[in-house]
Amino acid sequence: MAPEVVIRNCKVVLPRGILNGGVAVAGGRISKIASDPNLPDADSVIDGGGKYLLPGPIDSHVHLREPGYEYKEDLRTGTMAAAAGGVTSVIDMPSGIPYIDSVENLRMKFGLAAGRAFVDYGQNCMLGDDNLDELEGMVRAGAVGFKLYMSKTAVKVSVPSDATVLDAFGRLAKLGVTTSVHAENDAIITRGMEMVERSGAKDIFSYAEGRPKIAEVEAIQRVALFSRYAGNRIHVLHLTSRDGVGEVAKAKRSGTAMTGETCPHYLLLTRSDLRRLGSIARINPPIRGNEDDRAALWTAVADGTIDTIGSDHSPHRPDEKEKESVWEAASGFTGVETIVPLMLTQVRKRRITLRRFVELLSENPAKMLGIYPKKGAMRIGSDADLVLADFKKGFKIKSERLKSKTKVTPFEGWEVTASPAASFLRGQMIMQEGEVIGKPSGAGVKGTSGRVA
């Protein structure tokens, strides 16, 4: 098949090094990776300007709010924000209204996204007490995985019983899909927050006090035990602490099929940032803000204990976030548009290597979801989802420039020193210098590794 697009004059980031050259795209997939003289001609030839060409980042942890909370965000605005920020695929969580907890609701969700998404999109479905018989059908219908909430204060859902979780894990082991876990012990944080709120404390630090690290530790231990017995894959979301990453490391050493995630806000925001931000920084689980935990998270990012970085994009309106008391504020903030420039800046600061960036934001999310090497790979036959990274051009993060419907960000005013200059979805440019180009062209990313027994 003759290529439709050639991107040349790039530094192509490959698993074993960097190639000066580019890629050819045929049928929406990478058809050749070569030095410029060895690339074929095409109707569309794009000059990469010597920038780094990476596999497209996958944000495997977003809450796009539709259905049910479209006033905060919707599938069109959320995926436009992703495209503007250099993300080429998003995986949505199931916590809208209705919850995505059945085959019917999953099909409804894919229908809502059709023709409106600017990047490719996938769906995690809810794991609950009353939908065990729906699990296989949801995998057949295209679920990329499932979401387990271990605390009802994360969203207004009941927490599945331990018996349900163990049963579900056994079924999901046979289906071959990953369960992403919000790991906080429900009883500990429910009582903890009630006690701290009754004390009269209302600052952002009191929120973290009400959701102590032991809640994260116990939940990881419990879910690891269940997974080890059931034989399924689990992905621990938004790790916040030295204690939490220690438990993930132990689980991995014991043979548990576990991966771990953290988010830019846990890695980057300091205690002084939290003091300045106040209730805007409220998110679940809480940002600890101390250097010991941040240092442990960075070590875990570097040594592979943490496998992915997701944004936990969870937008709210300013009036829902800007409160005098942290207990009155909504939990979460926008993040899908800032994750790539923030983490590229960490590459420039040499906190992580460019190769590690690719693993954390492209390869490992795709592998965890079972969609590698269709997604997340710079190899022949993979979808030509690509981003050009510019390490010579930065900008200041300003909320009014964000594409999300609601724009509250804890990184307001931050200077990033690297940026995504252009991104491509199956070889077609969808973003240039932060501006989204063309009409929505995103398609559903459906689970490819699920093996229905």
Image: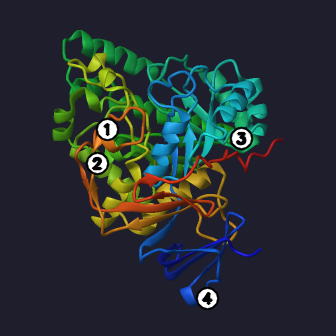
Q: Which one is nearer the viewer's eye here, 13 or 157?
A: 13
Report how far apart the C-alphas of labels 3 and 1 lie in the structure: 37 Å
Residue designated by label 4 = 38
- Residue 287: x, y in percent? 30, 36
Dot 4 amino acid type? Asn
Instruction: Please give left or right for residue 262 compared with residue 233 in the image.
Output: left
Of the image marks 4 and 3, the number of the one nearer the N terminus: 4
Q: Which label is found at residue 32?
A: none
- Residue 426: x, y in percent? 63, 60
Compared with 5, 124 (above or below) is above
Report how far apart the C-alphas of labels 4 and 3 lie in the structure: 45 Å
**Mark 3: few, some, or many residues within 10 Å (few <14, many ≥20)?**
many
Could you tell me if the residues under marks 2 and 1 are in contact, i.e. CB atoms within 8 Å? yes
- Residue 360: x, y in percent? 47, 57
Residue designated by label 2 = 397
Report how far apart the C-alphas of labels 4 and 2 lie in the structure: 39 Å
Dot 2 amino acid type? Ile
Q: Which one is nearer the viewer's eye here, 210 or 415?
A: 415
**Mark 2: few, some, or many residues within 10 Å (few <14, many ≥20)?**
many
Report how far apart the C-alphas of labels 2 and 3 lie in the structure: 42 Å
For the point 32% across and 12% down, the residue is 194
| Residue at disc 4, secondary structure | helix
Residue designated by label 3 = 173
Q: Which label is found at residue 409?
A: 1
